[in-house]
Every structure is written in structure tokens, then in C-alpha cells.
Amino acid sequence: MKVDVYFTTNFIEKDEQFSNSIVIMIDVLRASSTIANALRNGAKEIIPVDSTEKAAELYSKLSRETRILAGERNGMKPTGFDLGNSPFEFTTDIVKGKTIILTTTNGTKLFQKAKNAKLKIIGSFVNSEAVINFICKNILQEITPENININFLCAGNFGQFSYEDTLCAGYMINQLIQSISHVEISDASHAAKSLYHQYSDNLKDFLKTKEHSSYLKSIGFLEDVNFCLELNLCPVVPIIHTYNAQMGLYSIRLN
């Protein structure tokens, strides 16, 4: 088994690039963390859409009783949306049984990647243990590990490298290689794992000083940052399924 990391979404995807891969998609601040919390609190599904216009159009076609329009641009809730992208907004009383149309600056572009992957999973610090356990105890029991690759795709921040996504990938790689023998890690995976080890003793304090965390704090979302950097708050495994192939839409639901 080979484990690899893509630090941003700025790569041209070849048709069969991920066809033999389990792909873990990471946007720590905040899409992955918010999706995990929404599903933990009973949301039926999340449909990620890459623009506010497409999100509003899809929202208008769904039943009024079961739909929620959510997202952000530059961290803030767009005008007319029901919810933003704070995990604290997605409470049980609001999201239980609902379909959430979600559009974000970085995360929902990420979720369009790896179209031909065997399996696409949403990962973050808040559900990292559940994701690794699911892969080790379920998926790899059915597939010979030598015949599958694991790829971590990081959202980054405006197309640039972000520490929080990379260190989350590094943390999960570290957990993975402790559970599976005969793992081959790429240079990128080694770099992510090494960075995690370098900052593991003060991980949260370190990440709170970085670019995206600092920006979110500046616009009033310090508690979101704290939530998103906590380990294993949400014991769920969000899986990306095809929703409408013609429109290129996906539905994120629990495994």
C-alpha cells in the first residue's frame, strides 16, 4: 500500500489517477469539521456545491421542509443563506433529518476531486480516529492492502498550502502506519508526518497562530478554531456518494 498527500487542490487530475485509491479529503477550517458535526447531529446528507449561485438554484428545487442552505465566502455567511459554516450552527434541532446544501471557499472545491476513487471520505481532527478505524477494520478487511492506495487531499487556503490540513494528514498517516504493516509512504506523506511530529506537543497552540486560524479569529470565530482543532469530537465517517452524475453533484452521508 502506498500513502500519498496532495497539499492543495491545484493539480490537474488525470482520468484514472485515483481509480485504485481510498481518498481522505481534509478541510480542517472548517468544511470537514462542520460536515462531521452536522452528520453527528442527525443531518440526512450534505450536498457540496462549488458556487453560491448553484447552491441557491439547487436549494430552490428541494422541499421547503427538508432543506437548509449553508456556507461561507471569506468566512462569512452569504446574504440570504440559512446558516454559515460554523460547526456550532449545525445543532440537532436545526439539522436533524435535513438535506444541507453547502458551499464554501475551499472545501467544496476539494470535494469535486478524485471522481474515480474507490472511496472518498471526509476527514478532520474531529473525526480522525473514526476514519482510520473505519479504513483499518472495514475496508482493508475486504481488500488486500497491497492492491490499494490511500491518498490524502488537503483543501489548503485559497489554493495555497495550509498547516492545519497538512498536520491533520500527518496525524492520520501516523495513526495509519501504526495499524497497518507494509506501508510505503511518499515524500509528501513523510513531510506531513514529520511536520506533525515536530509540532505534536503543542499542536493546537501552534495551529492557532497560523494564517487561516488567525483570520477566523479576527472575524469572531475563535471558538470555531478551538472546536476544529480538537481530536475525535465527532465519531462519524462521512462518505461522498454520487448524487447527480449529470450535474456533477455529490451527497455526503454517514457510512
Image (cartoon, rainbow, N blue to C red):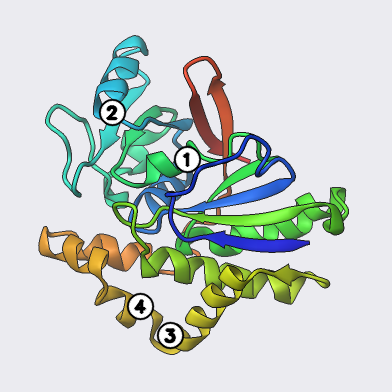
What is the C-alpha distance between the residues marked 1 and 3?
A: 27 Å
Judge from the rendering whether residue 220 lies leftward or rightward of residue 171; answer left or right: left
Q: Characterize the local packing of mark 1: few (<14), some (14-19) or many (20 or more) Cα atoms within 10 angstroms.
A: many
* Kind of residue indicated by mark 3: Tyr
- For marks 1 and 4 on the same chain, the one whose residue lies earlier in the sequence: 1
Dot 2 amino acid type: Leu
Distance of label 1 from label 4 (alpha carbons) = 25 Å
Q: Residue tagged by mark 4?
A: 204
Classify mark 3: helix, strand or loop. Answer: helix
Give me the disc on residue 69: 2
Amino acid at dot 4: Lys
- What residue do we see at 84% from left, 52% from top? 147
Q: Which residue is mark 3?
A: 199
To which quarter of the image does residue 82 belong? top left
Q: Position of residue 141 (x, y in %)?
A: 85, 54
- Tell me how far mark 3 sits from mark 2, CA to CA: 37 Å
Q: Position of residue 179 (x, y in %)?
A: 75, 71
Query: Along the polypeptide, which appears first: circle 1 or circle 2?
Result: 2
Q: Residue at x 58, y 49 (%)?
A: 237
Q: Which residue is mark 1?
A: 111
Give me the residue at 66% from left, 44% from top: 18
Under circle 1, the secondary element is loop
- Which numbered disc, 3 or 4, marks the residue that appears first in the sequence? 3
